[in-house]
Image: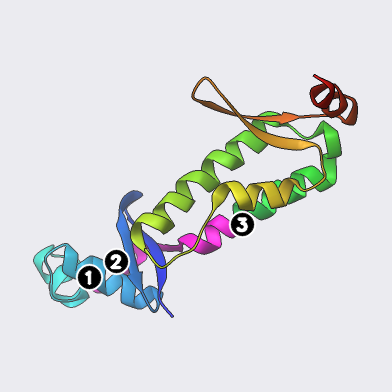
Amino acid sequence: MNRVYQIFANGTEMGCFVAASEQGAVGLYIRDAGYKNLRDMALSLSRTQQSLAEEIVVEDVREQYDEVLSCMRREIRVHGENASLQTLHGYYEDAFLLGNILRDTDHLCAVDVDSDVAEVFGESGFRVSEEYQDVMIEFVSESDTEEEEAA
């Protein structure tokens, strides 16, 4: 099964590649950069294959996405209604960006960030609110919910 991998070299994002493995993604990156293989790249840059390979970082985008959702769950589980809205909003932004990468790179990938975040929030009282083109994370108590329903 193919996965989406994000490639970094020397701390710079080089792009996202769909491949069956990390090695396959690195091979795609190297060919995308205009080289036949790692050996050809090393020769062209007067470097060793090992030194180049050590500078290439490969991250599975779906694993990153799932980890962000896990961090959101942990924040809510540990802190309850006192969870940091700023922290949750940061996680939401990360999930949104990673979700877009997954959708844009692998059109067969079924990611729905809003549904996934709503599932994470569950009955915690947190929700995503969109006002004036801004996305906010807010905590809504039961009394707030009752007041909204009455209005």
Q: Nearer the viewer, mark 3 or mark 2?
A: 3
Residue at 81% across / 37% down in the picture?
125
Residue placed under numbered mark 1 in the picture: 48
Whether tag 2 and tag 1 are in contact, CB under 8 A, the answer is yes
Question: Does residue 71 appear left or right of residue 14 in this picture?
Answer: right
Amino acid type, mark 2: Ser
Give residue 20's position: percent from left, percent from top. 38, 79
Amino acid type, mark 1: Thr
Q: How many marks?
A: 3
Question: Does residue 130 appear left or right of residue 133 in this picture?
Answer: right
Residue placed under numbered mark 3 in the picture: 67
Residue at 53% across / 57% down in the picture?
64
Q: Which mark is residue 32?
A: none
Residue placed under numbered mark 2 in the picture: 51
Mark 3: few/some/many CA within 10 Å (<14, 14-19, 20+):
some
Question: Does residue 123 appear left or right of residue 48 in this picture?
Answer: right
**Towards the viewer: 34 or 79:** 79
**Towards the viewer: 80 or 43:** 80
Residue at 13% across / 75% down in the picture?
36
Q: Which residues are magenta?
A: 48-67
Q: Nearer the viewer, mark 3 or mark 1?
A: 3
> Which of marks 2 and 3 precedes in the sequence?
2
